[in-house]
Amino acid sequence: MPRIEEFDRETVLLKAMNVFWDKGYNGTSMQDLAEVTGLNRSSIYNSFGSKLELYQETLKHYQKNGNARFQKALVRAENPLHAIRLIFESFLPEIIGDDRGKGCFSMNCKAEMGNQNQDLKKWLLDTQENTLDVFQDLIADGQEQGTINKKQDSKTYAYYIFNAFQGFRMTGILIKDKKILQQIINNSIQVIT
Amino acid sequence: MPRIEEFDRETVLLKAMNVFWDKGYNGTSMQDLAEVTGLNRSSIYNSFGSKLELYQETLKHYQKNGNARFQKALVRAENPLHAIRLIFESFLPEIIGDDRGKGCFSMNCKAEMGNQNQDLKKWLLDTQENTLDVFQDLIADGQEQGTINKKQDSKTYAYYIFNAFQGFRMTGILIKDKKILQQIINNSIQVIT
DNA sequence: AATTATTTGAAACGATTGTTTCAATATATA
DNA sequence: TATATATTGAAACAATCGTTTCAAATAATT
């Protein structure tokens, strides 16, 4: 009975994400979103609820993409240590190709909205925990397998790698030199080998 | 002949900084600024030019404070390696005491405005260069003096430390556990010893 | 005490903010 | 084909945005 949505939700979400990513949450207006998606304001509200809900959905979309990149690295890696390296390197194309200097969407959210909205803060904490777990599991495996040293426990190393990873996303905003970025990765991983 | 400004510029700047720091540039309204500073809108415009100019001035104020912290660490340090450690540790009180989760003002600016305003981008690049130089000089000194290894050149290590430092500021937004943060510092410095 | 240069307060500016309303449109089912 | 259900477009909502205006207030100088 119902009339069906005319637009492709995935496409709209992607376009909306790019605006939020570029301009930030507060820097993006519903006007911007309507223009870039081609949807009428009312259609956006009807389909996504509100500006904040749309923002949250684009964040999840972004993170899903990031998780996929993590998974790809896990599959391709020869061992856990190599997997960590591949995870870092898998973001090199995004960083170097990011000519607008948008950086990391998730990191931008953390800086702009992490202390302004409890729902977003909770989401950030959850994804942080998730990333930490991935790193910790990899490190624990690597320690058993022998490619990662046992000088410190996997959790401690996970925090260290997580820290380096976040720095990597921030550094990549203004530094696009692949050689420099690659050396940062090498040195960051050095500690756990 | 002229009537003198009634307010203390330094105090106003500090109050304005805290709002920008907390809410971001786009999240802060002139209303907010007038309320928190106690100044009338016209007085703000008369004394600081515009919202953007006031924002830039608060950023410089923040950075001046950060530089002072760097200098303090340099003076107190026993050697260049120790200086780098002290620089990281000098931000621990700010991180742990930051109960509102504001993070690093400069990092927030980078994430929110680095790609939106050319003047701000230029300022961010300048301060980045400055920080990198400080680290490189320290590392070069440490390498001559013997507390820092010579496996890689000072510039490469400077980028690595810079990366870890930026991660540190981001990690500190959601992680306030001093022991964890201290371990991140230890591991980050490990590479260059 | 008169003059002059500046700041201050209140009000208003047009533009834009996020959101809502509702009639017109469209389509899958009966 | 008629009906029911949903989406769409345009307009309008009150509120707030950053900024400007200008007369009143103020204080250092003459």
Image (spheres, coloured by chain):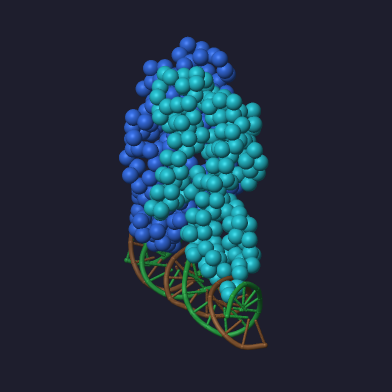
Chain colours: A blue, B cyan, C brown, D green
Query: Is A10 on the left-hand or right-hand side of B34?
Result: left
Q: Residue at x 63, y 61 (%)?
A: B8
The residue lying toward the viewer, choosing from B23 and A69, is: B23
Tell me if residue A8 can be seen.
yes
Query: Is A114 on the left-hand or right-hand side of A177?
Result: right
The residue lying toward the viewer, choosing from A22 and A31, is: A22
Q: Residue at x 34, y 29 (%)?
A: A179
Q: Is residue B48 above or below residue B153?
A: below
Q: Residue at x 58, y 51 (%)?
A: B22
Q: Is residue B64 above or below residue A175?
A: below
Quarter of the figure with residue A40: bottom left
Residue A77 in the image, given as x and y percentages of width and height: 38, 20
Query: Is B72 on the left-hand or right-hand side of B25?
Result: right
Q: Is residue B190 above or below residue B56?
A: above
Residue D28 in the image, given as x and y percentages of width and height: 62, 72
Tell me if residue B192 can be seen.
no
Q: Is residue A48 above or below residue B165?
A: below
The residue lying toward the viewer, choosing from D26 and B58, is: D26
Residue A14 in the image, given as x and y percentages of width and height: 38, 47
Q: Residue at x 54, y 14 (%)?
A: A150
Residue A124 in the image, given as x and y percentages of width and height: 54, 40
